[in-house]
Image: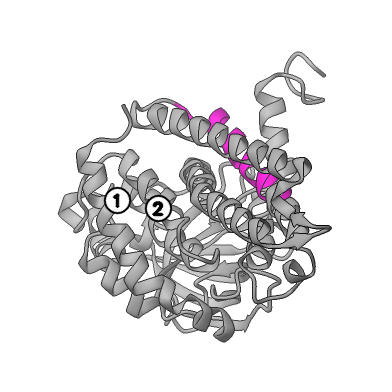
Amino acid sequence: MLFTADHDDIRRSLQKFIANEINPHVDEWEKADIFPAHELFKKMGSLGFLGLNKPVEFGGSGLDYSYALMMAEELGAITCGGVPMAIGVQTDMATPALARFGSDEVRREFLAPSIAGDYVACIGVSEPGAGSDVASIKTQARSDGDDYVINGGKMWITNGTQADWICLLANTGDGPVHRNKSLICVPMKSKGVTVARKLDKMGMRSSDTAQIFFDNVRVPKRNRIGEEGKGFTYQMIQFQEERLWGAAACLKAHEYIIDQTIEYTRNRKAFGKSILDNQVVHFKLAEMQTEVELLRALIYRAAEQLVAGEDVTRLATMAKLKAGRLGRELTDACLQYWGGMGFTNETPVSRAYRDSRLTSIGGGADEVMLMVLCKMMDTLPGSKGNA
């Protein structure tokens, strides 16, 4: 069994925190196009939520991945997508490689304060010309004695305007593109780091997303995570947790929209009966609830494999793909049943419609997920056995 009484204790504490400290402020943060990351993360760090599966010696709880997955699922109860995404960057996107491969020195400097909520973290992989195609990034970290000198830029950086440090993927050599990259912890206050702009997004409004430039930024080589040239590999491993997190965070969010749609269509009348009484509506909602439960089963199976130390690339990729596709179908169907009200910004379904669209793009687009799966199935043109 994936979850135990210990999971349930933490789950209840997290549910209470979301109800008291997050959801009452979501509408305000959405209107402001930002939420107070330092303030919120410090509260979460003090309660131990930011390091459930991180090493005890750096302030974490030392629990297995199932606890992180449980938290991701519960964050779906937050009534917007931006805040849980920002939390997920802190816990499951910017810090897994650091926790697993970083030296004790670099973990003390960057991981420990991130777990405590004293630092806000962001992850710097995507660039204007390299989103899902990670191997083609252009940002360079040139060796200069005991330092790296970094030049380039990153795009679509969640938490970027508030972050204290960035887990940066950069080219540190001239070799093959899959073996010339390194992950480096770069303090955002370093000379030459510029937050060029905060992006104006369609959804995820409460999450700040930045474009960042690096102009001769000098950082010590001791800030590198693990071995030089292993950054691409480390990031691919880190992606598995990110993609599982992204899928798990959709579950309760999808169920919330189904529940809200049931309530609205039960009370909304047309042609002498409630909208919900139409078979096309209540059948569709039943199908959507079934799809959510199927996605949950896939995610739980992947989590069990991850806890057991197995390679979850295939299942995590499937879960990420399915979560994105389901989010688009579900929110579109539910918005239709809200009629004109669904097209206004004052309803939860319109926010979900905007926010859920990112799941099929961020962390690897649907098409990249399909390429990964086809390669594993030996059906991708040019792959072994299918040249």
Look at the image and give the residue range highlighted in magenta.
311-329
Residue nearest the viewer, comparing 311 with 277? 277
Q: Element at badge 1?
A: helix
| Vertical side of 280 occupied by 310: above or below | above
336 vs 237: above or below: below
Taking the image as drawn, is residue 340 in sight? yes
Q: Amino acid at mark 1?
A: Arg
Do we see residue 135 in this rendering? no
The answer to whether mark 2 and mark 1 are in CB contact below 8 A is yes
Q: Which residue is mark 2?
A: 74
Residue furthest toward the front? Answer: 272
| Local crowd size for mark 1, using a 10 Å CA cut-off: few (<14), some (14–19), many (≥20) | some
Q: Does the magenta-highlighted stretch encompass residue 323?
A: yes
Question: What is the C-alpha distance between the residues marked 2 and 1?
Answer: 7 Å
Element at label 2 = helix
- Rendered image: mark on residue 323: none
Asked whether residue 297 is drawn in magenta, I would say: no
Q: How is the image coloured?
A: one colour
Q: Residue 216 appears at what percent x and percent y?
A: 54, 77
Residue at position x 71%, y 41% from top? 284
For the point 42% across and 82% down, the residue is: 189
Looking at the rendered structure, the kind of residue marked 2 is Glu
What percent of the width, then of the height, locates residue 296? 50, 36
